[in-house]
Image: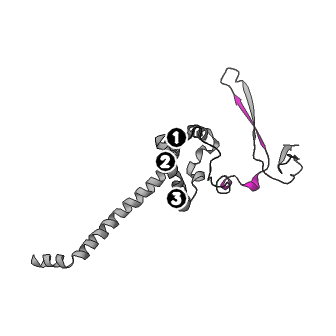
């Protein structure tokens, strides 16, 4: 027994270091998984629309009804990679206290500052080299009444952009002072 006490006394620092290292290594996976779950939580649509950006209530309603509702907010507003995550969260910290206390401007001033450029957001899906003018969509629906009354609605999607003159299937008209064209089908 005296031999064990003498060994412990002699190797006390080494044993403490070993125990601390083992404890750290045991908790490391917990911190990594916890950090990952925290990032997933603060980048979720639920967090963005219900906790953090509840002040933008109309934005969450518009988002839910938009074609982008299948794209998580963070994909465009945060971006990929650690650098974008850190920048986004640091910028968001300045808005934390006003959001919690309700001490923010009403209405929220626009345009918002420090937005990521469209080349890093929109243009990852909407390729500028694929812009070809306005797209007209005709949607036909039928009512649930006895004669199944036909109803049609027309949408014009503005997917224009700066282009050169198109092929003969379209007629281009330059819009004054804008450098863009308005295309119509022949």
Q: Does the CB distance between marks 1 and 3 fall below 8 Å?
A: no
Question: What is the x, y in percent for residue 143?
Answer: 68, 25
* Label 3 sits on residue: 86
What's drawn in magenta, residue-wise? 123-147
Is residue 72 among what the camera can see?
Answer: no
> Which of pointers 2 and 1 indicates the residue nearer the eye?
2
73 w.r.t. 146: above or below: below
The quarter of the rendered structure image containing the N terminus is bottom left
Q: Name the foreground residue: 57 vs 62.
A: 57
* Label 1 sits on residue: 54
Question: What is the x, y in percent for residue 69?
Answer: 59, 43
* Chain-order first, disc 2 or disc 1: 1
Q: Residue furthest left?
A: 1
Whole-angstrom CA distance, mark 2 to mark 1, is 12 Å
Residue 142 belongs to the span the image colors magenta: yes
Q: Which mark is residue 96?
A: 2
103 w.r.t. 121: above or below: above
Q: Which image quadrant for residue 80?
A: bottom right
In the image, is 167 to the left or to the right of 66?
right
Q: Name the foreground residue: 29 vs 106.
A: 106
């Amino acid at each position: 027994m005296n031999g064990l006490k003498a060994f412990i006394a002699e190797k006390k620092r080494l044993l403490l270091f070993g125990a601390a290292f083992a404890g750290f290594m045991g908790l490391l996976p917990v911190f990594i998984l916890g950090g990952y779950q925290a990032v997933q939580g603060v980048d979720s649509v639920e967090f963005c629309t219900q906790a953090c950006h509840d002040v933008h209530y109309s934005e969450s309603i518009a988002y839910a009804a938009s074609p982008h509702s299948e794209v998580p907010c963070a994909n465009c507003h945060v971006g990929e990679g650690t650098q974008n995550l850190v920048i986004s969260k640091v910028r968001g910290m300045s808005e934390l206290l006003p959001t919690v206390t309700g001490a923010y401007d009403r209405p929220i001033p626009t345009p918002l500052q420090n937005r990521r450029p469209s080349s890093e957001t929109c243009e990852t899906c909407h390729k500028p080299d694929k812009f070809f003018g306005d797209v007209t969509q005709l949607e036909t629906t039928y009512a649930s009444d006895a004669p199944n009354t036909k109803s049609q609605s027309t949408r014009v999607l503005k997917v224009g952009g700066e282009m050169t003159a198109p092929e003969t299937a379209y007629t281009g008209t330059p819009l004054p002072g804008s450098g863009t064209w308005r295309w119509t089908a022949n």
